[in-house]
Amino acid sequence: MKTGIFSWFGYILPIEERLKLIKDAGFDNVMLWWEDESIPRFMDKKSFVSLANELGLNVDNIHLPYEDCNLLWSDKTSDRESHVNEVLKYIEGCKSSGANRIVMHTNRGSLSDVDYKNGYKSFEKIVLLAEDIKIKVAVENTKKFEYTDFILNEFNSDYLGFCYDSSHDFINGESKGEILRKWKDRLFCVHLSDNDGTDDRHWLPKKGIVDFKSIIDIIKETSCDRLSMEVYPFEEEKKLSPARFLKLAYEINRKLIV
């Protein structure tokens, strides 16, 4: 099973430097964010996949921006269709940059009282594009998983699957692994991190309350062959250099696999 980590891991450095540190730490894969970088200089997001590949890193997935994702369910047709068109452009851009898998949120925060037909219309277009250009779309478990659950139930496509986030699943009484078990046959990728049960801390695994033994056991039953982490340094790790933090993260990742 391959190791991976998100390209943002808590240290303000140019992306090419972060990618090199990730590779030097021993990781096989990297997860990217679909947004240009401006510090310390402008870097076009379309170059990120090739930068990673040149360093010998495979790209697990690219995460799409999610700030306006609730518009996917909007009753206002113009707002909904405008956002869907934006998402379609994101997906096409990711494909043209060399990615073969993207992650997106179906909803954000405490979205409620929506017409499910509107979400269906939005994802019908997204799934059709994914099938047409051959890129896999993984919908992630966030707060109020019923919207993601609805989409996975409605669209039985080889190009629509599940991204499991362990931290999201162990906050405030979420499913604690049951979501993963339910959708393990549709699992495309994972975001692994730990927390204290109250907030999405992005701690290194085994630092909080997440039951990684049961989660990893389920993942091993799937076709997903990558354990990718979305972690940042906290408390005692903040004094570590970027290279040392990444090495620690890599060692923990390898222990999860065993």
Image (cartoon, helix red, strand yellow):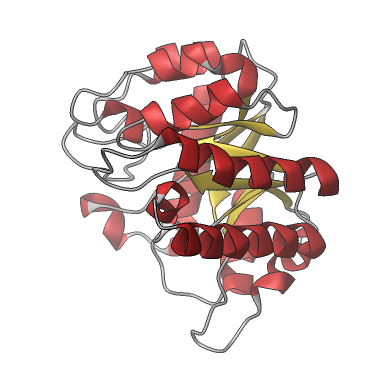
Quadrant housing residue 94: bottom right
Asked whether, in this view, residue 9 is left or right of residue 16, the answer is: left
- Residue 60 vertical position relative to residue 178 in the rendered view, above or below: below
x, y percent for residue 121: 57, 42
Residue that appears at 42% across and 55% down? 71
Could you say which is closer to the camera, residue 236 or residue 101?
101
Asked whether, in this view, residue 157 is left or right of residue 182, the answer is: right
Instruction: Give the position of the N terminus as an image quadrant.
Output: top right
x, y percent for residue 217: 51, 11
- Look at the image and tell me whether residue 21 can be seen: no
Outermost residue toward the bottom in this view = 41
Quadrant housing residue 17: bottom right
Asked whether, in this view, residue 239 is left or right of residue 250, the answer is: left
- Look at the image and tell me whether residue 226 can be seen: yes
x, y percent for residue 193: 38, 37
Could you say which is closer to the camera, residue 254 or residue 38?
38
- Residue 160 vertical position relative to residue 203 in the rendered view, above or below: above
Could you say which is closer to the camera, residue 155 or residue 200?
155
Instruction: Give the position of the C terminus as an image quadrant.
Output: top right
- Residue 13 vertical position relative to residue 147 in the rendered view, above or below: below
Residue that appears at 65% across and 46% down? 126
Residue that appears at 54% across and 37% down? 120
Could you say which is closer to the camera, residue 79 or residue 197?
79
Residue that appears at 40% across and 52% down? 74
x, y percent for residue 101: 70, 45
